[in-house]
Structure formats: structure tokens, C-alpha cells
Amino acid sequence: MRLDYTTSSFIILGGWNPNIVNEQWIRKNLLDRQDEQLEIGINIGVHGPIIEAVFRNVRLTIIGQRLELNLRHSNNFTRIEDCVRKLCECQSDTQVTGYGVNFDYVDNSKIHNNLRSIFAQSNITQQVLNESHAYSIFLDGIITNINIDIKTLENKSGLKFNFHFNIDSVSTLIQRMTEHPIKSLNNKALEFASNQYGLRLEN
């Protein structure tokens, strides 16, 4: 199973000002050089405008109270962390309530038997097209939400990890992120999948 960078994310919940996603503000506060490539777009979603900026292999999206950062490709998680630190430095008064680090692993050509066995106790006699199993645990003291998906007809399977942190300020966010770097959380996901399900996840 491989990491899907387009759906894996770093999400911060809070009172974000969508007006920060403009070329002048981003170039001043988030980029190191004024000539770096930057793309900005606005779409209309179900819950209001979706404001998006793409720079330095990072996609930044604001949807309501949700600020989301994704890598477009590669596993250079420090790009995300650098962006979070710069955001917090220049938006230090922003009210935040929590953040989550999400890893979405998928296999588009195989349903792993170790995952299928989780659903073996079902009493349903008809063919099940899609199955999902979600649970939450403390993994090394961190709230961790795990979701397993199987799509029988498409022969696909997925394993998602959400590491959740409750916070009350951007300074606490930086402190928690420093204590638990994204790479460290990613290693916890890899180790858990191997020990619990015998799966080898790849970034």
C-alpha cells in the first residue's frame, strides 16, 4: 500500500482569515524568494468558497474554519512543518481548537487478506460491495483514529490514520508539532500497520 499525497494532510481547525490567501501576503510571509512559483484559485463549494494556493510542492486550502496543507508529491514533510511555523508566526492571534495529521494509504489493485479478515464475522449473506471499519485508540499517548476501507468490485483497499491533537493556541500547536514531528507520526503508522496487520506501507 502506498501513501496518497493528494488526500493525506495536515489540518488545523480555527478562525482562519481567508483573505490571507492572496499573492502579496503569501509571497511576503510564506515564500523565501519573490520569484518562486505560486498558483492561487477560488472555487465555490457546498459550505462556501474554497480558497487554494499551491507553492513549494505544498497545497494550502481554506474551507470555513479548516486550513488544510497537502504535499503534491514526495515525502518531504518538513515543507509542511515550515509552512505551519510561518503561518503561526504571522497569525499568532488566530484562535485554534485542534489539528490533525492524516496519512491515507491505498492499494488500487489488491484487497489484502489481513484487512479482509476483519470483516469475516459479518452475517450478511449477499455480496458486500464496500466495507468500512473505524476505531480510535491511544497510540503512544496520542489520539489516533484508524479507518479501513475495502471496495470489492474495484479490488481496492485503504488504511487511513488520523493523529489528533487538542490545542488552544498556535503556540501550543508549534509545541506539539515539535514534540511529534510529521515524520515521527508517519513512522508510528508504518509500525502499527506492520505489527497489527502484517502490512508493508510505502511512502
Image (cartoon, rainbow, N blue to C red):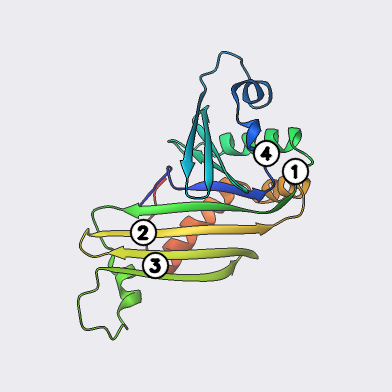
- Residue at left 54%, top 70%? 136
- Residue at left 69%, top 46%? 15
Q: Nearer the viewer, residue 55 or 185?
A: 55
Alpha carbon distance from label 4 to label 3: 42 Å
Q: Between tags 1 and 4, which lies in front? A: 4
Residue 25, percent across and down?
Answer: 66, 24
Quarter of the C terminus within the rendering = top left
Residue 151, percent across and down?
Answer: 27, 63
Q: The disc labelled 4 sits on which kind of residue?
A: Asn
> Are dots 1 and 4 in contact, CB under 8 Å?
yes
Q: The disc labelled 2 sits on which kind of residue?
A: Gly
Q: What residue did someone put label 1 on?
A: 94
Residue 165, percent across and down?
Answer: 66, 57
Q: Nearer the viewer, residue 134 or 109?
A: 134
- Residue at left 68%, top 26%? 29
Q: What residue did someone put label 4 on?
A: 17
Residue 23, percent across and down?
Answer: 59, 22
- Looking at the image, residue 129 sits to the left or right of residue 30; the answer is left
Secondary-structure class at tag 3: helix
Secondary-structure class at tag 2: strand
> Are dots 1 and 3 in contact, CB under 8 Å?
no
Q: The disc labelled 1 sits on which kind of residue?
A: Thr
Residue 197, disc = 3
Q: Residues within 10 Å of mark 1 (few under 14, many from 20)?
A: some
Q: What residue did someone put label 2 on?
A: 158
Q: Earlier in the sequence, mark 2 or mark 4?
A: 4
Alpha carbon distance from label 1 to label 3: 40 Å
